[in-house]
Amino acid sequence: MHILKIIHGYPPNYNAGSEVYSQSICNELSKHHKVSVFTREENPYEPCFRIREQKVNNNLTLYYVNNPQGKDGYRHKQMDENFADLVKQIKPNIAHIGHVNHLSTGLIDELNKLKIPIVYTLHDFWLMCSRGQFLTRSIGNENNFQLCEKQDDKKCASDCYTVYFSGLKENETSEIEYWSSWIHQRMVETKSFINKVDLFIAPSHYLRNRFINDFGVPENKIIYLDYGFPTEYLTKTEKSKKKTNFTFGYIGTHIPAKGINILIEAFKQIEEPATLKIFGRANGQSTNALKLLASTSKNKIEFAGEYINHNLANDVFSNVDCIVVPSIWGENSPLVIHEAQACKVPVITADFGGMKEYVQHNVNGLLFEHRNVNSLAEQMKFAVSNPDKIKQLGERGYLYSPDGSVPNIQDHCKELEKIYSKFIYKLWRITLDTNPEDCNLSCTMCEEHSPFSTYIKEKLGGKHRRMPKEWLEPIFEQAVRLGVTEMIPSTMGEPLIYKHFAHFIELCYKYNIKMNLTTNGTFPRTIKKTVTEWAKLIVPITTDVKISWNGATANTSQEIMKGIDFEQAVANVKEIIRIRDEHFANTGYYCRVTFQVTFMQNNMHELADIVKLAAELGVDRVKGHQLWTHFDEIKHLSMKVSPESILQWNEYVKQAKEAQEKFRKVNGEKVILENIIPLHENENKEIPESYECPFLEKELWISATGKISPCCAPDDLRNTLGDFGNIQNTSIEDVLQSDSYQNLVKNYKKIELCKTCNMRKPK
């Protein structure tokens, strides 16, 4: 896939948390995907909004938009237009936004126009606070940077935008009105993102809840997902021998929101010998002011300067005993906390926002009262006096893993891939023809096992195809990345005979993918399992057990399904449903049971009775499809063979719907009828244009030999659709993105096979 990452800054020019995180995911994703980054630079000597390209590697390209004057503006028409031209050129599959601050809110609209899905990771409050942190900013207030509860147009203008006022008293009212209007319009703009973005990601529960409760993001449109980290350079290190005193560390930018002044004031209260090292890029007057504040400390305060992320463990964490995160705003998920925990360095942080989600007092660190100097000093004094205890707390590491390890960047990006895939692809199910030539019945209509079929003998030379066991897991791995939720073992043949069926089940559990099972209902004892044992194995991991069912009487069933024991099949269904209901009562998980019918002239006289039998047994659904006439011997059995047979079918449909109303399951529910719909008069020649394919972009088939197919039509027919590659040398994603597949999606209604397909149905 091609991912467009949008972020307001990118290392090395910008090294705050969201920028470092963005670089980490881009580096990892580019190992498997094409990644383009749209970010900013501030070059006063070049034209505004010019885009400069920089190639990092074959899969990773940076596009810098020049915005030297965009500190407080939120929408720039020229940037939007240049961005749109770029997107049309590079053609990404999805956009992942980290920030549009310092860029333009209009980027969202351009993506919407081009129908590119948008995932938005929230790093702060910028969408609902024009300054991003809910901290006040004003002129003349002795105690600035107060916490703000919520956005309010007039209050924001008076508290935060007085920096733009003239200072003349007679202008104050009009200036408040102007900036109130500005803020209002800005908030209307960002509030519109709720409907324009496909999914929001919050790296803390605190942030997620704020956006739900205070901003109105629907709960189903915002998920929690913690950050991931390149843990290869975040390893536990030996403490530097040069260090003598107990040493505190601060890592981050030198801005007021980070609360470094509180840290310095708290550190000054420590009487015992101790050291404070402040790491991070200098920030002009802010850093100078902090140095002045630190100059009166009797204990050493060292401004250690910048560090290289990849050297964080050796250059920073090996030189400190504890990390302090003193932010005065509601930080959502500070990277530094996770980085410290990865290296088993204890953390002292505030009991507020997302910070307290990752540090539990006296478990893996210490908490102090937010913005309280004395409370922070108390915890720092405890750390100095109890070095062994504080070290022990550090050993716990990350709270949400058994061994204290933080989420690694590889697993994190796999989660992102799943999220992207849900919006890029609509694929939700894959059928693996695991063992198409293995079956214990000979059904009349079966392409391979019918008494009329010569397929196995002539086309396969009597050989049976069986999917190798070693293919299964790589296919599951691809499937889960693409958002697939169901897998079907063979629809040709009997899947329960497959030698590696148990392994198939294991993989369903491992990758959290449900099985959708089509079986002939015999529950063969080839591996010495009773129907009860089969049911207990299948039901917990299966969404739907579709049982081939082609009659309401023994005679009709046995005429079509050669070798079936009808009475035993009925008994098997009863047992499956008993186990299903028992499992549901114990766990709340419900596995649907379906009668799968082939609509033919020699069984449709019993369609209403099949519906009745389903209701009596507790079967949830009766579905099916019109007969594929593989052989001349069965062509006369099609319900579409003539206008008269179509009229007859429509009468059977009417009878089935009447039976659906008359006969209910024990719980009073109706049996679901699917694909049991009237046929049009000329449907034997061409189905209506409005009928849609239920499979394209939703399902794929992979044969026992690895061949990838777009639909379930008989082999000879679906071969006419083209060659879509083999799983041995082609990825599923490559198939979905290929020109041949996309052309089929766009033009299938013009293709001969699709014009008369038995599976197309009304919207």
Image (spheres, grey):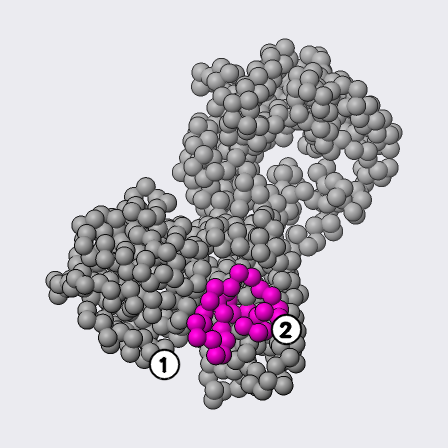
The residue closer to the viewer here, 660 or 10, is 10
In the rendered image, residue 554, in percent from the top left (x then y), is placed at 69, 12
Q: Nearer the viewer, residue 714 or 323?
A: 323
The amino acid at mark 1 is Gln
Label 2 sits on residue: 180
- Where residue 250 sits in the image (x, y, percent)? 29, 65
Which of the pair 656/390 is nearer the observer?
390
Q: Is residue 157 magenta?
A: yes
Residue at image coords 29%, 68%: 264
Q: Amino acid at mark 2?
A: Ser
Left or right: residue 747 versus residue 316 is right
Q: Looking at the rendering, which quadrant does residue 249 occupy?
A: bottom left
Q: Pointer 2: residues within 10 angstroms few (<14), some, or many (20+)?
A: many
The mark nearer the N terminus, 1 or 2, is: 2
Identify the element where label 2 is drawn: helix
Residue 390 within the magenta-colored segment of the rendering: no
Residue depicted at 46% across the width and 31% down the height: 505
Seen at 80% across and 26% down, the residue is 657
Circle 1 residue: 285
| Mark 1 and mark 2: Cα distance apart in space | 30 Å
Q: Say few, some or many: other residues with alpha carbon within 10 Å of mark 1 (under 14 / 14 to 19 / 20 or more).
A: few
Q: Position of residue 502 (x, y in %)?
A: 44, 28
- Where disc 1 sits, the SS reads helix
Residue 653 visible, this orientation: yes
Foreground label between 1 and 2: 2
Query: What stretch of residues is rendered in magenta?
Result: 130-159
